[in-house]
Image (cartoon, rainbow, N blue to C red):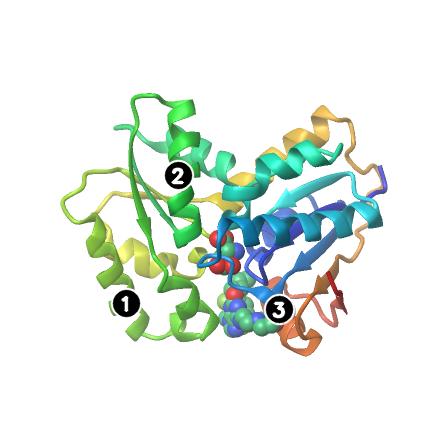
Amino acid sequence: MEAPIGVIDSGVGGLTVVKEMLNRLPNEPIIYIGDDARCPYGPRSTQEVRQYTMEMASALSKMGIKMLVIACNTATAVALDEIREHFSFPVIGVIVPGARGAVKASETGNIAVLGTVGTINSGAYDDAIHALNPNATVYPLACPEFVPIVESGLYKSESASGIVAKALVGLAGKEFDVAILGCTHYPLVQHHIQAHLPDGVNIISSAVETVSDVEQMLLLKNSKRHSASEVAPIFYTTGKIEQFSPIVEDWLLIDQPDVRHIIL
Ligand code: I24
Ligand code: DGL
């Protein structure tokens, strides 16, 4: 099928999911919308996040997509069900895949979840984990400091390590063998997170796990694209093209990416 897969996010963070998709499903065309003008979603109200997510999904629906991936954890946490009910194409969020990866990887059933305030307050990861393993114990931790560390570029410096260490004190004394990176940005501070978690804790990235679900859904719906030529992804931003493009170039290693402005 030639129709593209739509991917939406509060900004550029969803490019962590796109990166996995380009690696593992290189023949699938992608249309991405990043709502940079209203990023971050993490501190916003449920109602705002639902409305913004619906606006992005509607824009992609009009362009014609065969599937939608909500790459943003905060948007998935509060808007997935509503978006699913509203459209006829399959909709995949990042939370169930992340939860499944964690439940599979955990021997003890004790799982830490790191995310934005919106994601953690929604309880969506707790629900998804308990649906898969009713005996699981979940330790949720909101880490509102982490998105700003990445977006300021501070994640590359050693001072980020201290900020991460301080946040993770919230898990002190808890016993868990798996931690979920329940936010698009956290793979960029994964080394700092790993360094300040107890030895042997396995880190699961929802971005990585999600692509398995996308692939499965393509097979289930028999909607995998057959031609083997690669199609360049199209990126829309509600923000500034000249701020979005360098991040795409840097992160996805695409020269002169097709980045366009969109008003929602
Ligand atoms: N990373 C993210 N957001 C940013 C950033 C970053 N600036 C530097 N890096 N800025 O998210 C957000 C501000 N908006 C304004 C509107 O236009 C878009 C940007 C994480 C991205 C994860 C893929 C650091 C950085 C980078 C390149 C690649 C990855 C990365 F410069 F983290
Ligand atoms: N994309 C968001 C998430 O995965 C992080 C950035 C934001 O707060 O908007 O939760």
Q: CA distance from mark 3 to mark 1?
A: 26 Å
Residue 42 left/right relative to 88: left
Cβ atoms under marks 2 and 1 closer than 8 Å: no
2 or 1: tag closer to the N-terminus:
2
x and y, in percent, of residue 249 in the image: 65, 70
Q: Dot 1, crowdedness within 10 Å: few (<14), some or many (≥20)?
A: some
x and y, in percent, of residue 16 in the image: 55, 55
Q: Which mark is residue 163?
A: 1
Residue at far bottom of view = 242
Say which amino acid is labelled 1. Ile
Residue at far front of view = 47
Element type at mark 1: helix
Q: Which mark is residue 123?
A: 2
Say which amino acid is labelled 2. Gly
Residue 229 left/right relative to 16: right
Element type at mark 2: loop
Say which amino acid is labelled 3. Ala
Q: CA distance from mark 2 to mark 1?
A: 24 Å
